[in-house]
Image (cartoon, helix red, strand yellow):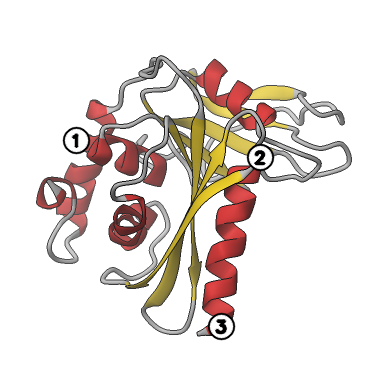
Amino acid sequence: MLPIWQPKRFDLDEMVRTQKRVAESVVRKNGFKKLERIAGCDISFSEGDVAYSACAVLDYKSLELIEKRVQRVKLRFPYMPTFLAFREIEGMLRVVAGTEADVFMVGAQGLAHPRRAGLACHLGVIIDKPTIGVAKSRLVGEAKEPQNRKGAQSPLMDGKDVIGAVVRTKRDSKPVYVSIGNKVDLKTAVKITLETTKGQRLPEPLRMAHQLATEAMRKS
């Protein structure tokens, strides 16, 4: 299925067309009946074209780590703003292959992307699973600063479109940017983000995945 969503060469026109297909394929409603296991997915970059992709699977209720996977990956595409998915998706697919989780949380944008096709959307559409994008910075859109308390939020707007939510996960800390990846509605995406945050700015699935990827990179 990968060739359908991943250009074989660096071609901006083809990449834009792929993003359009991804955006049109995103399902914006919940596509799961239970929520027992949640996976966090992140990538840390080493030197040159090498990166480390990690997936941490947690029990949703206790937030205890159930399974962890790390893969050293070679990047085929250069870094370009708004085209991040083409650089990272292959490594992320390798690390989530065979992973059993009800929802996948990605440390990147989902619909909060100029063409509504962030990495969380690409991953969700390709694996046909519920995904959420939780990013540390804003890529596009405008929003009011949420109140300084955990759970405070404000809509992230791009013109008249609500493309995500700016969510305060910890008092006296910068907010995160939550958006739909696939098969999750925005209200549920925010709820999951807050329920999996435990005293830190990042939700536990992403914090653990980032830690795994960073440790692997440092040991290389």
Q: Residue at x 39, y 15 (%)?
A: 29
Q: Amino acid at mark 2?
A: Val
Please say whether residue 38 is visible from this viewpoint: yes
Q: Secondary structure at mark 1?
A: helix
Q: Amino acid at mark 3?
A: Lys
Q: Position of residue 207 (x, y in %)?
A: 64, 52
User: Dot 3: few (<14), some (14–19), or many (≥20) neighbours within 10 Å?
Assistant: few
Residue labelled with disc 1: 21
Front in this rendered view, residue 82 or 3: 3
Q: Position of residue 185 (x, y in %)?
A: 46, 18
Residue labelled with disc 3: 219
> Does 144 sit above or below residue 48?
above
Question: Residue 8 got which mark?
Answer: none
Left-right relation of 168 to 109: right
Residue labelled with disc 2: 176
Front in this rendered view, residue 126 or 8: 126
Q: Cα distance, mark 3 to mark 1?
A: 38 Å
Q: Would you identify the image quadrant in which residue 166 lies?
A: top right
> Does 81 sit above or below residue 182?
below
Identify the mark nearer the N-term, 3 or 2.
2
Q: Amino acid at mark 1?
A: Arg
Q: Residue at x 49, y 23 (%)?
A: 35
Q: Cα distance, mark 3 to mark 2?
A: 29 Å
User: Dot 2: few (<14), some (14–19), or many (≥20) neighbours within 10 Å?
Assistant: many
Q: Secondary structure at mark 2?
A: strand
Left-right relation of 139 to 191: left
Front in this rendered view, residue 95 or 92: 95
